Amino acid sequence: MRFTCAKADLIQAVGTVARAASKMQKTILECILFTCDDGVVTLRATDIAISIKTEMTAQVEEKGKAAIPSKVLHEMISRFPESDVTFESIGENAVKISCMNAQVDLQQMNADEFPSFPEIDRKTQIKIQQKLLKSMINQTIFAVAVMEEKPILTGLLFDIGKDSLTVVALDGYRMAVRKETVISDVSESCVIPSRTMREVSRIISDTEENIKFCVSGNMALFEANNTQIYTRLLEGDFVNYRNLLPKECATNIRVETEMLRDSIERASILARETNNVIKFIIEDKVLEVTSNSEMGKLDEKIPVISEGNNLKIAFNSKYVLDVLKAVDENEVDMRFNTAVSPCVVRNEGSDKFEYLILPVQMRD
């Protein structure tokens, strides 16, 4: 194997696949597999749960393949001069990598032991703009469960309908629901690990170009920008999220997103000593945000458009801030029923997003 490529292309390709490589050293799964063909070098990495494959253009002088440990390779090429980089196999056990006056011989493992990637049936595919999928991921993934008592909740639900995609995350304290129009002729649902979706969000670009997505058995595949991401699906039954969203509300307010976010950020400074608890008091077209601790007291009044009953309710400030930082609307509607029932945050006149936040018990 011998090829030459631009350092920038190499850094991008290695960085794309390296995060799928296993952290276990001295195993083939810690390696990136390089495969050289006419004018193209394909890079693969996997830890079995997630597998990533990408391509880069190169001047290939000798076809072949090599499995090189990911971590040391990434660290080494990052410190090379800004110039072309040449890879050349030295027998069966090493690869010479050179860039201007820099040169290193790295040990390689047996490329034939590198596991093959899953076979995916691509007959039915969903297509969505990359920037929309990135938005859907970033506006929901903060609500996935961190603890693994219920593994199914550590992933994102992809609920695929006729020309629609709904992404859902919940952790028992809040729920995020995000919906968009897609190109699809299938109806199915699956739960994808949050780790995979973070990688998808990192790799795809903020453009209107489509990303392709398909499900086959217990696997899913994302394809975009000469890159393929394979992932195992989480097993189990996801919560029926539609039943969790209240159909009616007793109190409804519309508030400026940035004004409320800034107020809660100030309140959360004092709330650190009280388990992040802040209070909302809704009365006479005013939302009063309060926080009280040994450090001091905050009391701010925000003008709102309101309908319905007056209400006093408390929340974990972090959960409300996560929602307000995720939405990209100037105003949001907040819907309440009682001091012990969940609040729903949404965009007026649209089901593009809906967030459900459970309140906390108030202590006077």
Image (cartoon, rainbow, N blue to C red):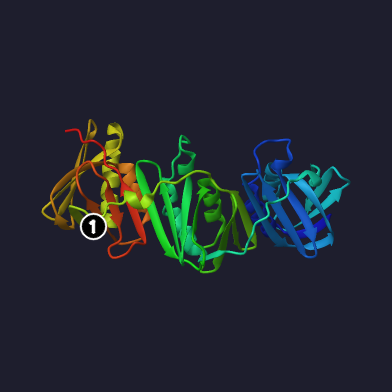
Q: Is 78 placed above or below 25 here? A: below
Residue 310 x, y percent position in the rendering: 13, 49
- 353 sits to left or right of 66: left
- Residue under label 1, please give it: 255
Look at the numbered disc 1 and give the secondary structure of its residue: strand
Name, please, the residue furthest toward the left: 284
Q: Is 137 placed above or below 193 here? A: below
Q: Residue at x 29, y 54 (%)?
A: 345
Residue 180 x, y percent position in the rendering: 43, 63
Circle 1 crowding by C-alpha within 10 Å: few under 14, some 14–19, many from 20: many
Give the number of callouts. 1
Q: Locate the C terminus by quadrant.
A: top left
Q: Residue at x 16, y 57 (%)?
A: 306
Task: In this rendered view, identify the residue nearer to me: 11 or 25.
Answer: 25
Q: Residue at x 49, y 39 (%)?
A: 151
Residue 182 x, y percent position in the rendering: 48, 66
> Can residue 324 be seen?
no
Q: Locate the N terminus by quadrant.
A: bottom right
- 250 sits to left or right of 185: left
In the rendered structure, which amino acid carries the disc numbered 1? Val
